[in-house]
Image (cartoon, coloured by chain):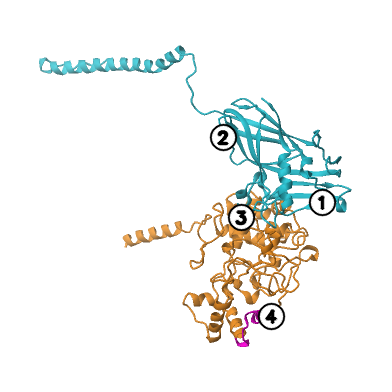
Amino acid sequence: MIPEPRSNDGTFICILKYKIMKNTIIWLSRATRWAALTLIALPLFFTSCTEEEKPDNSPKYGNLTIEIDHVWGMDQKPFLLNTAMVHPMSGDTMTFSLIKYYLSNFELIKADGSSFKVPNSYFLVSETDNKIELKNIPMGDYTAVNFLVGVDSAANNSGLQQGALNPSNGMFWSWSTGYIFVRVEGTSPQAANNTFLFHLGGYMPPFSAIQKKNMLLGGNSISVKPDAAPVLHIRTNVAKLWHGPVKLADVSVVHSISNLSVSMSANFRDGITFDHIHQ
Amino acid sequence: MWGRTKILVLVLFFHLGSCQKNPTSAEFKFPNDFPNVEYKNPNNELTPEKIYLGRVLFYDPNLSSTRTISCGSCHAQVHGFADHNLPKSFGVHNRLGKRNSPSIQNLAWNKSFMWDGGITHLDVMPIAPITDVNEMDLPLGLAIERIKENKQYQPLFQKAYNDTTINEKTVLFALSQFMLSLVSDQSKYDDVRRGKSNFNKLEKQGYTLFQSNCSKCHSEPLLTNNHFEYNGLAVNDTDVGRFRITQLQKDTHHFKVPSLRNVALTYPYMHDGSFSNLDQVLNAYKLKFQLQNQDVDALRAFLHTLTDHKFISNLNHGEIHPFNP
């Protein structure tokens, strides 16, 4: 209880001022309560009224998997390690112990010609490591995929790299700085010393074995969007490497740059083809 | 008096503050009268701690298959970081190498490495001798494992990188740092260049002859133009040199011009070590350039002024084995 001053007429104005102040304070405290309630209630009011989504213009992304099937020859028999296979063109019997190759610099193209370059995309593919994950691709329908067989010139010459380009991966020429783009080894009765070894590399013209692949998706398109998991199935026909044919009796070891490396890597690139899309 | 004490305390405080020994950058300075540095790696700052780690790795024979051969085995400080009087070096199991061990000096100014320039970045240079079957014969991944298995390395990596991760990057960056720190620029020739000393009469004659006959390939101040040249001195040489890398005919028998700094210490000479001493080289060039005997004496005197005694006795560069067995 607020004590009233005991004063006479001289303090009438004082009492009035005091009463005004007291009432203002009471009014304000009530108003504040209402203001607070309003502030809390208002958004709830609006939220419960509007059920439709707020428009969201932020860019959307999705992922894309590329799965590579390794085959042997035009009739696409499965390619197997440690299994004797006859080359359809040269007739050489080849038993493979190893196949590894780089695919890099992926670019996805839309029907209108616009494209998206996947940053830092370097992948080391082998018979067992045959899935490539491309992440954070802008949402859209893509009708072509471009990539390099091999490693681009700048990355060959940038010093020590990590990940797929780590020199410990067995795809690096220590004596001539640069990557082996396609590495294939095995045995064959037709090869000198019964072994064959093809290490195709080189990025300096005129012996650059880097090959560009422009892969159209046969009139189809891949739809990239959030919460989707499209898979692009492609095929690598390993036999294409000896297209010509390149007979093992003539050459069974390649481990430096040459015109042969260039033509073999070009054939290998031609042997990588679009198969189907699993949306 | 109290005022002066306050100042003293302040001075002490700031002095102590500047003594902090965190890994610091830019403590190592390259000579400013050399050309621009060629080594490019913005992620590999030079610090004393990384240089020290690189030095320990450089002299560690556990990076070879038989645990007997280190980088220092074929790159000895006393010989200007070339080998001890061997035309070609011996690796594990006494296997013989293919070319003469080059001197490790002033590599920050190299555009390429090895006699044929096959290696184009210092950070990947050690991979070649470590993995070569005739040298250290150890796959790179296994070399990393050898370093990891020695727990005494951990504090060195911690000091260098603030992290104990041991991988290709932390190992090779440290090795680069040690090699980059091997700068030779304190020879008598350098003192003369900087006006701090004078050649004697014979040395001066030699220098003049050098400038007319030799400096096209052995250009100053690095004493190499870092190009691939054919000096015509070889006899029956099967080594095709730069051709092995470029496969271009014009590069056959061409080799990278070595720096002549510390040349008096780095015998034998040429890519195959086929010239045992300086006089053999000078006599071959005497024939080629039609010089006089007296010219040879003068050139010899000048070439000796390229010896950097500080470089070969620098205690920060020498062989070190800091670990307990």
Look at discs 3 and 4 and give the one toward the viewer: 4
- Give me the chain that's orange: B
Q: Amino acid at mark 3?
A: Phe
Marker disc for residue B173: 3
Look at discs 2 and 4 and give the one toward the viewer: 2
* Residue in the image at 53% along x and 80% along y: B208
- Give me the chain that's cyan: A
In this view, which residue lies farthest toward the front?
A244
**Residue at the disc numbered 4:** B280
* Residue in the image at 89% along x and 48% along y: A189
- The mark nearer the N terminus, 1 or 2, is 2
**Residue at the disc numbered 2:** A115
Gap in angstroms between the C-alphas marked 2 and 3: 37 Å
Q: Quadrant of residue B132?
A: bottom right
Q: Amino acid at mark 2?
A: Ser
**Residue at the disc numbered 1:** A252
Q: Amino acid at mark 1?
A: Ser
Q: Chain of mark 1?
A: A
Whether residue B321 can be seen here: no
Marker disc for residue A88: none
Gap in angstroms between the C-alphas marked 2 and 4: 64 Å
Q: Which residues are magenta?
A: B282-294
Look at discs 1 and 4 and give the one toward the viewer: 1
Percent x, y for residue B110?
Answer: 59, 63
